[in-house]
Amino acid sequence: MHTPDDGHTLAVRDLQVLGADGPMAGRLYKASADGRRDVLIVFFHGGGFVEGNLEDADPFLRHLAEASGYPVVLSSTYTLAGVKPFPAAVEDAHAVLMWAKKNKGKLGWTGKRMLVAGIEAGANLAAVCALMARDRGAPQLAGQILIMPMLDPALSTCSMRQMPTCRNEARMVEECAAAYRDYLPHPADRSHPYASPLQSSRLKNLPPALILSVEDDPLRDEAEAYGSKLIAFGVPTTVRRLQAVRLQEPNARNECACQGHALAEIANFIDGLDEETLPESC
């Protein structure tokens, strides 16, 4: 249990969610208070599709659950590429959204607003979930929050190509390339919009987006390019480039998200969602 500064108690508990092929580990964050919450954020961890777990983003999500009116935050695992490659992870992610829609009472959520979010590979899954929800007609999403998203399997952007001149960033580029080889072993999948949303030519009718990049991040340009494409397709989109911060480890992306003022941007984004015009999730 964690106690926010204003006296509310943050309840954190592990639970099982339902993926495409069966139960998976999840974790729920909710500030204890009377009544259910109107906003649910479903969050997917990073790890380049090949690693990562619920612990990675735990400190960040504890803070997020205290932001912008105390949303309910559901963190979920998904099938890693070493177990089964694309599209297993994206099918899991969409299935978790559908499970959350059906189990709002268990989550302490009214069913009013569902947002999907993630960091790095998890942000790829969040972006893809927005596409899948549109294409499959459910669930209705009120927004998508993409933090330093992995969106370009070709690793072709300027920020990605420039990073090999820096030793630490060069290591991350190599890790990204290796991760995509495991996640997308079939070359034809690299252009699939559910693997690379940046390549999609069908980006209309998606929920409002908040896209956060970081100044010295190799993923910076693909994040901002996706934001530009969403805007061109008429999707209400906010793109913010956060200042670089000194990290204890070069690829400590969750730490970066905490220190880079991402929480304030997310809170502002949620506060700005127009409840008069956005349909409810259920």
Image (tube, rainbow, N blue to C red):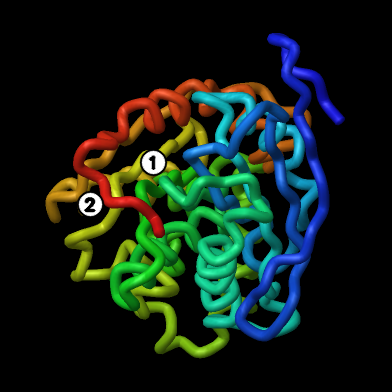
Residue displayed at 43% across by 84% down: 189
Percent x, y of residue 19: 64, 75
Tell me where residue 156 sits by quadrant.
Answer: bottom left
Read off the residue under disc 2.
230
Report the number of discs: 2
Percent x, y of residue 106: 68, 55
The tag earlier along the polypeptide, 1 or 2, is: 1
Residue displayed at 37% across by 39% down: 210
Residue displayed at 69% across by 75% down: 79
Tell me where residue 61 sits by quadrant.
Answer: top right
Residue type highlighted by circle 1: Ile
Q: Is residue 143 left or right of residue 118?
A: left
Percent x, y of residue 167: 66, 42
State the residue in front, 86 or 26. Answer: 26
- Where disc 2 sits, the SS reads helix
- In the rendered view of the protein, which quadrant contains the C terminus? bottom left
Q: Is residue 277 left or right of residue 225?
A: left
